[in-house]
Image (cartoon, rainbow, N blue to C red):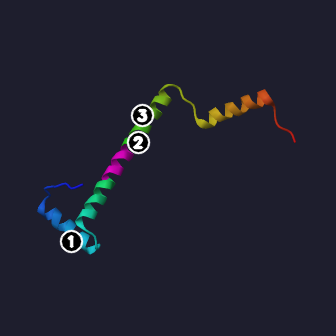
């Protein structure tokens, strides 16, 4: 897909120089920059969502995985006993 952008002349010149030094096209550099920006944006959204979920979990009285698995193990042991070989 083609797109047209108006860039600052100094920025474009600097990108063109660095792209040439790396034996790459300006198009490749811009595409990589946009992909990196998109990845950072998605990661930030994921962190925000996880933080909100953790806050809700803690607010609603959630317990740690260690405590939950400990209770599950105790219940299983009480129900089925220990396996003896």
Of callouts 1 and 3, the N-terminal one: 1
Q: Residue at x 31, y 52 (%)?
A: 37
Give the SS element for disc 3. helix
Task: Tell me the number on the disc at residue 17.
Answer: 1
Toward the top, the furthest residue is 60
Of callouts 3 and 2, the N-terminal one: 2
Q: Which x, y percent locates residue 2?
A: 21, 56
Q: Which x, y percent locates residue 32?
A: 31, 59
Please say if 44 is above or below 21: above
Q: Residue at x 45, y 32 (%)?
A: 55
Mark 3 — residue?
52
Mark 2 — residue?
46
CA distance for labels 1 and 3 = 43 Å
Residue 40, magenta (yes or no): yes
- The one nearer the camera, 4 or 11, is 4
CA distance for labels 1 and 2 = 35 Å
Q: Decide if residue 40 is on the left or right side of residue 76.
A: left
Q: In which quadrant of the rendered view does residue 77 lie?
A: top right
Task: Indicate the quadrant containing the N terminus: top left, top right, bottom left or bottom right.
Answer: bottom left
Badge 1 local density, few (<14 within 10 Å), some, or many (20+)? some
Give the SS element for disc 1. helix
- Depth check, mark 3 against mark 2: the one in front is 2
Give the SS element for disc 2. helix
Badge 2 local density, few (<14 within 10 Å), some, or many (20+)? few
Task: Tell me the number on the disc at residue 79.
Answer: none
Q: Range of the magenta residues?
A: 37-44
Q: Residue at x 28, y 64 (%)?
A: 28
Tell me how many marks there are: 3
Please say if 70 is above or below 13: above
Are the residues at dot 1 and dot 3 in contact (C-beta closer than 8 Å)? no
């Amino acid at each position: 897909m083609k797109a047209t952008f108006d860039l600052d002349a100094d920025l474009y010149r600097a990108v063109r120089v660095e792209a040439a030094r790396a034996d790459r096209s300006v198009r490749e550099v811009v595409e990589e920059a946009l992909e990196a920006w998109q990845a950072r944006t998605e990661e930030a959204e994921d962190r925000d969502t996880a933080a909100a979920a953790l806050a809700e979990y803690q607010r609603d009285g959630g317990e740690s995985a260690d405590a939950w698995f400990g209770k599950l193990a105790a219940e299983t042991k009480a129900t089925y006993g220990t396996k003896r070989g």
